[in-house]
């Protein structure tokens, strides 16, 4: 790490060096960094965002919206994914990509993830009370959450407090999380499944999982990343990967669901290639639980 042409105090130099070190670490192992004054601005902006996020949690501005998942053969709604939402006091929405990575980088994902889990369980209870207990609710769990030594105990405590049946809940982790500390992750996933909770591997195909590792992974479902679905209908590497994921899921005895389905052409191709489950704007956008209950009633009527 090299601080070029620096003339400030030692304390400022140390702060700048630490910022540069963080930037170098993001580049990977054995990397170096050269101090860039713009890092100070980026650091200040991240700090302001983190403070605003904490205030948003305290003010009840964080919620979840639910996006339906459809069995395209039966046209039944089989699940919903709980997605984090931050609506500011002025009504403006903060995109998840603006605050979830920040929460993960700062460690705030632990209390935030805990809140999102409780909100997802509350939504599951509302669905069950309305007669939709057969619809599973998928909640995303980050690596820091899953790798906490007491994650299973905390999850079970929230589950018991919610009054929701374990079979109504699905835990989603990304492929990269699954491959990180593989033995520990597998132990946690086995414990979840022993409780009756289902497990899905999200963003599958974006990482480097081998088939041998996948066979050992205690999971029920693979999710095809939306980036592969986007190019369905074109002769492309992305479409070939989508087809390969469907075949891999069949080989290891897992279900597969495609996310980001926006056109009928994509839905038809996915179904023709052996993937029955889909999620995306073709069917429904994410919505609050009260709105979802109305949508479910309308969906049932439209399907006859």
Image: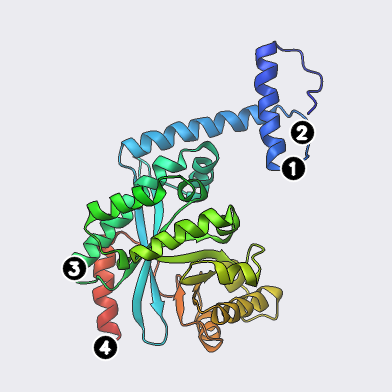
Q: Is residue 130 left or right of residue 221?
A: left
**Answer yes or no: do the residues labelled 4 and 2 have beta carbons within 8 Å?**
no
Residue 166 occupies quadrant: bottom left
The residue tagged with tag 2: helix, strand or loop? loop
Q: Is residue 239 above or below residue 196?
A: below
* Residue at x-position 46% and y-position 38%: 108
Q: Which residue is mark 4?
A: 304
* Residue at x-position 58% and y-position 52%: 181
**Could you tell which of marks 1 and 4 lies nearer the N-terminus?**
1
Q: Position of residue 218 (x, y in %)?
A: 49, 67
Quadrant of the image containing the C terminus: bottom left
Q: CA distance from mark 4 to mark 2?
A: 62 Å
Q: Which residue is mark 3?
A: 130
Q: Is residue 244 left or right of residue 88?
A: right
Q: In this rendering, which labeled residue sits more in front, label 4 or label 2?
A: 2
The residue tagged with tag 3: helix, strand or loop? loop
Q: Is residue 234 above or below residue 18?
A: below
Q: Which labelled disc corresponds to residue 33?
A: 2
Q: Which residue is mark 1?
A: 29
Q: CA distance from mark 2 to mark 1?
A: 12 Å
Q: Is residue 117 above or below residue 266?
A: above
* Residue at x-position 65% and y-position 21%: 15
> Which colour scheme appears in the figure?
rainbow
**Could you tell which of marks 4 and 2 lies nearer the N-terminus?**
2
Q: CA distance from mark 1 to mark 4?
A: 57 Å
Q: Is residue 57 something that shows in the picture? A: yes
Residue 136 occupies quadrant: bottom left
Q: CA distance from mark 3 to mark 2?
A: 56 Å
Q: CA distance from mark 3 to mark 4?
A: 20 Å
């Amino acid at each position: 790490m090299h601080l070029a042409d620096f003339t400030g105090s030692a304390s400022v130099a140390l702060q700048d060096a630490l910022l540069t070190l963080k930037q170098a670490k993001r580049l990977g192992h054995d990397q170096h960094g050269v101090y860039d004054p713009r890092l100070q601005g980026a650091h200040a902006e991240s700090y302001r965002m983190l403070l605003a996020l904490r205030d948003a949690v305290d003010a009840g501005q964080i919620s979840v919206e639910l996006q339906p998942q459809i069995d395209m053969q039966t046209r039944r709604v089989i699940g919903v994914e709980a997605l984090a939402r931050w609506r500011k006091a002025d009504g403006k929405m903060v995109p998840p990509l603006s605050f979830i990575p920040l929460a993960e980088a700062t460690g705030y994902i632990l209390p935030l993830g805990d809140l999102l889990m409780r909100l997802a369980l509350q939504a599951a209870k509302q669905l069950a009370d309305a007669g939709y207990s057969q619809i599973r609710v998928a909640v995303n769990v980050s690596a820091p959450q899953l790798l906490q030594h007491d994650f299973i105990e905390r999850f079970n405590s929230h589950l018991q407090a919610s009054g929701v049946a374990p079979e109504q809940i699905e835990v989603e982790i990304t492929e990269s999380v699954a491959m990180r500390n593989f033995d520990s992750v597998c132990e946690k996933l086995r414990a979840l499944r022993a409780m009756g909770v289902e497990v899905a591997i999200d963003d599958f195909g974006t990482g480097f999982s081998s088939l041998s590792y996948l066979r050992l992974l205690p999971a029920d479902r693979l999710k095809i990343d939306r980036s592969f679905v986007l190019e369905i209908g074109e002769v492309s590497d992305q479409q070939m990967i989508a087809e390969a994921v469907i075949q891999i899921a069949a080989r290891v005895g897992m279900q597969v669901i495609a996310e980001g389905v926006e056109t009928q052409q994509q839905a038809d191709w996915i179904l023709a290639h052996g993937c029955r489950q889909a999620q995306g704007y073709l069917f429904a956008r994410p919505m609050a639980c009260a709105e979802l209950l109305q949508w479910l009633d309308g969906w049932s009527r439209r399907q006859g």
